Image (spheres, helix red, strand yellow):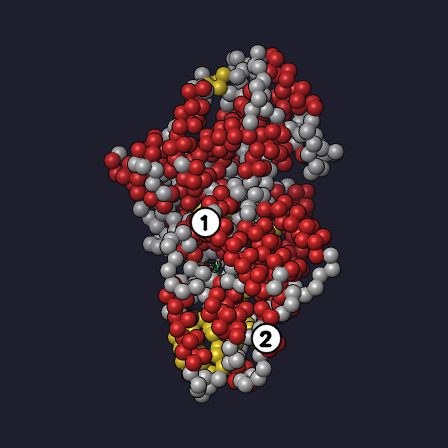
Amino acid sequence: MAQFTLVSGSVGLITLQNPPVNALSAATRQGIVDMMNKALNDPEVKSVVVCGQNRIFCGGADIKEFGTKISGPPLIPTIHTIEATNKPVVAAIEGSALGGGLELALGCHYRIAHSKARLGLPEVTLGLLPAIGGSQRLPRLIGVPAAIELITTGRHITAAEALQLGLVDHVTRSSTVDEAIKFAQSVEGKSLDSRRISNYPCPHLPDLDAVFEGVMQEVRQKAHGAIAPIACVQAVRAAATLPYLEGMEIERQLMETLFTSSQARALQYTFFAQRAVSRWSMPSGARWDTSMPKPVHKAAVIGLGTMGRGITVALAQAGLSVVAVETQEKQLKEAKLVVSGILERAAQRRGMAPTLAKITYSHDIRAVADVDLVIEAVFEDEALKEKVFQQLSAVCKPGTFLCTNTSSLDVDHLASLTHNPELVVGMHFFAPAHVMKLLEVVYGSKSSPEALATVMQLGKRMGKVSVAVGNCWGFVGNRMLKPYMEQAFYLLEEGATPELVDQALVEFGFPMGVFRMSDLSGTDVYWKIRKEAEPVGASGQEARVRKGLRYSPLGDLLCEQGRFGQKTGQGWYQYDKPGSRVARPDPWVHNFLEEYRARHGLVARRIDHAEVLERCLYSLINEGFRILEEGIAAGPEDIDMIYVFGYGWPKHRGGPMFYASMVGLAKILERLEHYHRAHPDVPFMQPCSLLRKLVTCGSPPVHKWKDVIKKIHSQL
Ligand SMILES: CC/C=C\CC(=O)SCCNC(=O)CCNC(=O)[C@H](O)C(C)(C)COP(=O)(O)OP(=O)(O)OC[C@H]1O[C@@H](n2cnc3c(N)ncnc32)[C@H](O)[C@@H]1OP(=O)(O)O
């Protein structure tokens, strides 16, 4: 797990060997301890270079070990030994030096990095803090403000930025290990007094208290309830105010609390779930590792509204040639300006040339004749999309994949209008499409494994977290959102205000509540969808029972007043002017709700945050279980990543299905039964049979649910 070689006569080369990322597993830590002892005790060795096998220094602690009983030696004493020795120790950083890997490098006397290397302390993203001395050494080396920023965001930085910050001593474009060996020899026998970071005083900051107060406020606001960023600030404060060893003790205590927290478990689950969703499977048995994607060099986007523009940007930034088609001249002109502007600003930020030449614009759909893949992003209108699919099927070269960005239409139906339904796949982007990480990839009943593999690979190229799901109304994300939003409306009927519901959800960790979100995206978006799905019928606009089930017309009544949210300056909240982002509670809405309740003989009651969360979240989770039972999502990780990366579900709660497992499935079942007894006309509250089955099986942990689902399916 670590190898020692004597090179150039006097340099002990220690190579970490734990593929794929040389993570610091128990065996690797043992290897480092043993090989370092060997090097430091060998009189022939005058200097040491530490590097990683396969051009990657070290990806940090072995995350798989977290949550298990940790064995093997701790690294802190070894890092102290390295720092204290009189033999110069040089870290040769290639690939990544992250978390414990960078902390190991910070214990070395010198750091040499390859120009393509990435460095960072991403522990916070796993619910932890850099607790192998990183929180104490980094501020001493690069100063408090820069250290706080790096530690609280977990951002990976380039070697160039690391050099600028003083985190590394030298950056090379040639062989990092060879340079490190040469450098180590050049400093053999020289004093290392000025190279031991733990001896450095923390660079002075005037008005330290005010600085930390400001930082804490900012970090708290961004954390949405996550505790690790707060602990990170506390640890850096200890570095800034206490001697090194006392700071180390604070670091240890803070880590002890974080290490066993449910937030750390959720974030570590998310780390692996994000990677697991790329290993997709289809109910037919087709899988990611047995299906070959086709190369996509040239793609087209049809329709250049907000979504089409974002998709065009995402494709161009992924290095593809793009044909962007919009039939309306005015919209086409405007789109060109917007897309170019986004690409230019992004290129400027990255210090690169924009990829404008990769896009050709046309108002004629025939311009897509030679592309490998088309993404249709026209207005969400069934007849329009039907026409576009028929046209595409006629004009595209044989084998072109036809994708739709629909959020609510039937992928199978669109596929049935083409000559080759096996080439049709849904690509459900989230606005803004060039920013949002999630891509729901919807395979239809006829989609070929090759088509799915191609689209999943394209999603990866665009930097998306792509999740393959089956075809059903709303796919996974929007389907689960329906019961959540319904409950929010029912809560208003029963006595809540939009502010109360939203506050409960924000305290849970969502960046914004359901009503604020609805105002942001436009209250009319779901109104249109509802009008199609739930026609008013003979009983009238205000009817609270439709097709024998409870229905709340509150959202429809609001829209009838022209209150479409932020864009009109009025929605569930009031805004200073149309487009303003500052939402204020609106007495008009409170009055509207009171009058509505009076008209329907509803008596308002006191509703607390716990009820809001149980009803909104548990009904959403219940639908998640139905989706798993039907095989629309292959596993709970798929649902969770859709919610974390597309719907603002707080990462430190792991996603709805992981959250359910943390709350306890028996409790979720009991509360759903309770609410279903109280509201028998709300089918979303009726506990799903998979949930019952899992509870009967003793509520297995989330990674075992697939086994239970498989068993259910094999019995069908
Ligand atoms: C006591 C606490 C002490 C120290 C604290 C820490 O060090 S916490 C750990 C901090 N490190 C990280 O957060 C780094 C996590 N890894 C990454 O960011 C990326 O994996 C990395 C290193 C940039 C490489 O990215 P790449 O895209 O090339 O590969 P991928 O992410 O798909 O990873 C490949 C497989 O390696 C597994 N893996 C990666 N890092 C770790 C790790 N630290 N521990 C365990 N396993 C790790 C990853 O899951 C992939 O596995 P696979 O089975 O192929 O999905």
Q: Please state the horizontal and vertical placement of residue 268, each as a whole percent of the image.
A: 45, 51
Q: Is residue 143 found left or right of 428 in the rendered image?
A: right
For mark 1, give the secondary structure. loop
Q: Is residue 58 found left or right of 158 in the rendered image?
A: left
17 vs 453, nearest the viewer: 17
Task: List the residue tagged with mark 2.
Answer: 195
Give the residue drawn at x 59%, y 75%.
195
For mark 2, give the secondary structure. helix
270 vs 3, nearest the viewer: 3
| Observer able to see residue 707 | yes
645 vs 162, nearest the viewer: 162
Quick check: 660 above or below 186?
above
Q: Please state the horizontal and vertical placement of residue 277, each as a whole percent of the image.
A: 42, 49
Q: Please state the horizontal and vertical placement of residue 71, each as a whole percent of the image.
A: 37, 60
Query: What amino acid is labelled 1 in the image?
Result: Thr
Disc assigned to residue 402: none
Give the residue drawn at x 45%, y 79%.
40
Task: List the residue tagged with mark 1.
Answer: 260
Quick check: 258 above or below 131?
above
**What is the spatial separation of the Cα atoms under label 1 and label 2, in whole angstroms?**
34 Å
Q: Earlier in the sequence, mark 1 or mark 2?
A: 2
